Image (spheres, rainbow, N blue to C red):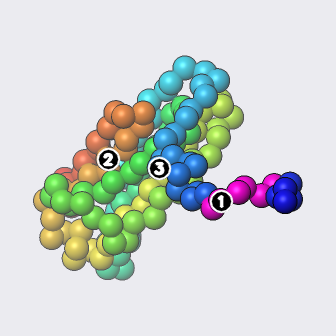
Amino acid sequence: MPLPSGFLPEPVSPCGVFGGGTKLTVLGQPISPPSVTLFPPSTEELGANKATLVCLINDFYPGSVTVAWKADGSTVTRGVVTTQASKQSNSKYAASSYLSLTSTEWKSKGSYSCEVTHEGKTVTKTVTPSECS
């Protein structure tokens, strides 16, 4: 008896059909590395016992980056929010990442870094609380 259209004679695992994470990028323009700027918390915010670090990532292509935050070289994940990349008017991309701390946490470390990886290359920007007081 023939099978109805669209059915296979035996079960097929979707894991066997699709790869485990290969990423294909079709380039419409040359690769452009990101411009990364890291801003320390404002004086006003520190006065309210808050500290938000802002990492601006601009002018990159293609539009995929990963962002890691570090405090004294150790990875920080709590308090991190990173936006999706959005296309700019120049057809390149921009994103931003935020690390929210208390002012006590901010002052307790020697340095904070925003590490942006794009097309296998990493750009690191670092700020130290002692330079900002």
Residue at the bottom extreme? 48
Q: Specify few, some or many for label 1: CA neighbours under 10 Å numbering under 14, 14-19, or 20 or more.
A: few
Q: Nearer the viewer, residue 21 or 43?
A: 21
Residue for badge 1: 10
Query: In terms of sequence position, does the residue under pointer 2 or pointer 1 come before the other?
Result: 1
Q: Are marks 2 and 1 in contact (CB under 8 Å)?
A: no
Q: CA distance from mark 3 to mark 1?
A: 22 Å
Q: Nearer the viewer, residue 39 or 28?
A: 28
> Looking at numbered disc 1 in the image, what kind of residue is underneath it?
Glu
Tag 2 secondary structure: strand
Instruction: Give x and y (percent) for residue 2.
Output: 84, 56
Give the side of residue 33 with respect to residue 133, left or right: right
Residue for badge 3: 20
Q: Does residue 78 appear anywhere in the picture?
A: yes
Examine the structure image and report whether residue 7 is included in the region drawn in magenta: yes
Quadrant that contains the N terminus: bottom right
* Most frequent secondary structure within the magenta stretch: loop
Instruction: Give x and y (percent) for residue 5.
Output: 86, 54
Give the side of residue 48 with respect to residue 92, left or right: left
Q: CA distance from mark 2 to mark 1?
A: 47 Å
Q: Does residue 42 appear anywhere in the picture?
A: no
Q: Specify few, some or many for label 3: CA neighbours under 10 Å numbering under 14, 14-19, or 20 or more.
A: few
> In the picture shown, does residue 120 fall above or below 99?
above
Tag 1 secondary structure: loop
Examine the structure image and report whether residue 88 is included in the region drawn in magenta: no
For image coordinates 42% across by 37% down, the residue present is: 118
Nearest to viewer (mark 3 / mark 2): 3
> Looking at numbered disc 2 in the image, what kind of residue is underneath it?
Glu
Q: Which mark is residue 115?
A: 2
Q: Specify few, some or many for label 2: CA neighbours under 10 Å numbering under 14, 14-19, or 20 or more.
A: some
The magenta stretch is 6-11
For image coordinates 37% across by 71% down, the residue present is: 79
